[in-house]
């Protein structure tokens, strides 16, 4: 027998909201969550292009092992699933320049 439980989602206390940018576009997230989670919630799944064929790549393992979600933050390439969002953070995708 399955027991249905009430939806308590409205009782979840979230961290304060912060704003960062992804490719110059403002994104709102909750302090402490990762860039990958915030971008996934916004529907942004294309984070970089594959070096071999230019195919779209994005979050895959979400624990920092595969590097599929790599982005540029402060001039460094980092895994977005391991990078916490902070107010004013500037994140850039690793997309190929238009040819």
Image (spheres, rainbow, N blue to C red):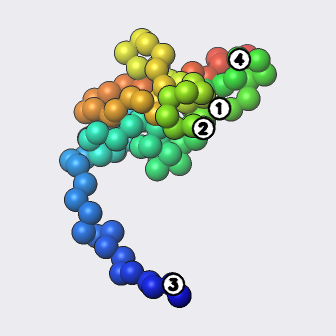
Where disc 2 sits, the SS reads loop
Query: Distance from label 3 to label 2 (Cα)?
Result: 32 Å
Q: Position of residue 84 (x, y in %)?
A: 34, 32
Contact (Cβ within 8 Å) of mark 3 with mark 4: no
Nearer-N-terminus badge (3/2) = 3
Figure quadrant of the C terminus: top right
Q: Position of residue 95 (x, y in %)?
A: 61, 23
Query: Distance from label 3 to label 4 (Cα)?
Result: 48 Å
Q: Mark 4 sits on what residue? A: 51
Nearer-N-terminus badge (1/4) = 4
Residue in front for this viewpoint, 7 or 71: 7
Q: Mark 1 sits on what residue? A: 57
Q: Is residue 58 left or right of residue 16?
A: right
- Reply above or below: 99 against 15: above
Q: Mark 3 sits on what residue? A: 2
Residue 60 — which label? 2
Nearer-N-terminus badge (3/1) = 3
Q: Is residue 92 visible?
A: no
Residue 20 — which label? none
Where disc 1 sits, the SS reads strand
- The residue under the point 38% across, 41% down is 27
Of badges 3 and 1, nearer the viewer stands 3
Instruction: Give the farthest residue toward the bottom.
Output: 1
Label 3 neighbourhood size at 10 Å, few (<14), some (14-19), many (20+)?
A: few
């Amino acid at each position: 027998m399955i027991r249905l439980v009430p939806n308590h989602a409205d009782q979840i206390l979230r961290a304060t909201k912060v704003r960062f940018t992804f490719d110059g576009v403002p994104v709102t997230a909750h302090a402490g969550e990762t860039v990958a989670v915030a971008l996934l919630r916004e529907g942004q799944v294309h984070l970089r292009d594959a070096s071999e064929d230019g195919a779209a790549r994005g979050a895959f393992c979400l624990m920092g092992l595969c590097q599929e979600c790599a982005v540029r933050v402060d001039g460094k390439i980092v895994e977005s699933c391991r990078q916490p969002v902070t107010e004013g953070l500037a994140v850039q995708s690793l997309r190929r320049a238009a040819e």
